[in-house]
Image (cartoon, rainbow, N blue to C red):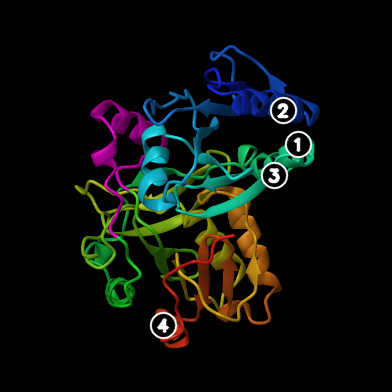
């Protein structure tokens, strides 16, 4: 059963109309409204104010929280001002609503810094506006996160200090830095209390947010990949900075990671499931780079799933399958970035050199 609730009372007439409309629209489409926070929850609309950005403390990873903030007049800057609100609310998605000159803009912001917007003009069909919100959020709320890791201290001894492939990964991380494609990991501790940090780590294993990742095939069944929340310009330690991905356990829904003994591992990138699917299907793919950047002249496909979901991985894998040359594909993810495959990391960087735009177009 797909239960959903409102976490608090809306604070304005517009938000009250919006919340009533969301309840009726989601209920009409197979969701069940509840006001009991102890029920199993699929979706929560969490209304916050500028003066009171408190988190909704979900009890399970599967609960998808959409924080909602309203303002009027000159809008906030989405990335310098609204993004910290998302972090402080511990939400999966942030709806920033701004009213100005008879027009309402709703900006949807994701933890990966993806952003897209829809607009509503006074006098327009309000149900059509609500349906657009539903169409944006429904695929996300029903997606399946694959972010748990199973670490095993069974990495072969000859790999404890890496190999030729990990050296190439480390060098490629430095290249991303030279191309100015590595924003610093977002300083979570600047915006979250120790309690909130513990809550975030317990739910998602997050200790930091960084953007982009890269991997390279080790053999037919395994690959090396940059870890989550690290400085990718300075990847050194095996099991901490660079991880050996063994596979995906569908029954337990976790990524299997092999590490050396006596290492405190970092978690695998949330995109590990996506890379695993691509390597498994395409033997000629030897490396994958995912960056939050853009290139002109590529096909841009709108992906509405969060990073780390099975559905996003399946969608990207299918787009690569349908490309003219899966072993050298460039998949544009609208409002998000690029996933690039190649027979090697060197091949990928040779193909993109001088063509990358740091700013992802948002719409």
Q: In this view, does 144 lie above or below 315?
A: above
**Residue 355: percent from the left, percent from the top?**
46, 84
Q: Do the residues labelled 4 and 3 touch (CB within 8 Å)?
A: no
Q: Viewer-nearest of labels 4 and 3?
A: 3
Closer to the chain start, of discs 1 and 3, is: 3
Separation of disc 3 and disc 2 at Cα?
A: 16 Å
Separation of disc 1 and disc 4 at Cα?
A: 47 Å
Q: Would residue 112 be seen by someone viewing this image from the given angle?
A: yes
Secondary structure at badge 3 equals strand
Tell me which residue sits at (52%, 27%) in the image: 46
Reading the image, the residue beneath label 2 is 21
102 or 315: nearer the eye? 102
Secondary structure at badge 1 equals helix
Reading the image, the residue beneath label 1 is 126
Q: Are marks 2 and 1 in contact (CB under 8 Å)?
A: yes
Q: Would residue 2 be seen by someone viewing this image from the given angle?
A: no
Closer to the chain start, of discs 2 and 1, is: 2
**Boundaries of the magenta span:** 184-208
Instruction: Specify few, some or many for label 4: CA neighbours under 10 Å numbering under 14, 14-19, or 20 or more.
Output: some
Reading the image, the residue beneath label 3 is 121
Separation of disc 2 and disc 1 at Cα?
A: 9 Å
Secondary structure at badge 2 equals helix
Q: Are marks 4 and 2 in contact (CB under 8 Å)?
A: no
**Residue 204: percent from the left, percent from the top?**
41, 38
Reading the image, the residue beneath label 4 is 349
């Amino acid at each position: 059963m797909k239960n959903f609730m409102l976490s608090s009372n809306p604070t304005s007439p517009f938000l009250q109309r919006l919340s009533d409309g969301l309840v009726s629209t989601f209920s009409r489409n197979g969701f069940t409204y509840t006001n009991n926070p102890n029920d199993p929850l699929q979706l929560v609309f969490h209304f916050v104010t500028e003066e009171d950005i408190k988190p909704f403390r979900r009890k399970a990873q599967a609960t998808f929280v959409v924080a909602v903030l309203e303002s009027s007049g000159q809008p906030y800057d989405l990335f310098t001002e609204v993004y910290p609100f998302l972090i402080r609310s511990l939400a999966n998605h942030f709806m920033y609503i701004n009213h100005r000159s008879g027009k309402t803009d709703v900006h949807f912001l994701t933890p990966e810094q993806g952003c897209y917007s829809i607009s509503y003009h006074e006098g327009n069909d309000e149900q059509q506006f609500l349906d657009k919100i539903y169409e944006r959020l429904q695929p996300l709320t029903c997606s399946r996160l694959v972010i748990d890791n199973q670490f095993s201290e069974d990495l072969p001894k000859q790999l404890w200090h890496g190999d030729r492939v990990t050296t190439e990964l480390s060098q490629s991380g430095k290249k991303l830095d030279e191309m100015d494609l590595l924003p610093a990991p977002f300083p979570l501790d600047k915006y979250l209390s120790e309690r909130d940090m513990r809550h975030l780590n317990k739910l998602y294993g997050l200790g930091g947010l960084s953007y982009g990742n890269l991997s390279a095939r080790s053999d037919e069944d395994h690959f090396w990949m940059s870890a989550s929340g690290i400085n990718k310009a300075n990847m050194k330690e095996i099991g901490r900075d660079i991880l050996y991905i063994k596979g995906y356990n569908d029954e337990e829904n976790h990524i299997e990671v092999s590490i050396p003994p006596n290492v405190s591992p970092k978690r695998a990138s949330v995109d590990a499931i996506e890379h695993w699917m691509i390597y498994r299907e395409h033997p000629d793919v030897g490396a994958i780079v995912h960056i939050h950047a853009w290139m002109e002249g590529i096909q841009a496909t709108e992906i509405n799933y969060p990073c780390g979901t099975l559905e996003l991985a399946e969608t990207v894998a299918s787009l690569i399958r349908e490309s003219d040359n899966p072993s050298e594909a460039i998949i544009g993810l609208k409002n998000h970035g690029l996933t690039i495959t190649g027979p090697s990391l060197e091949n990928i960087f040779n193909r993109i050199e001088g063509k990358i735009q740091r700013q992802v177009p948002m719409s």
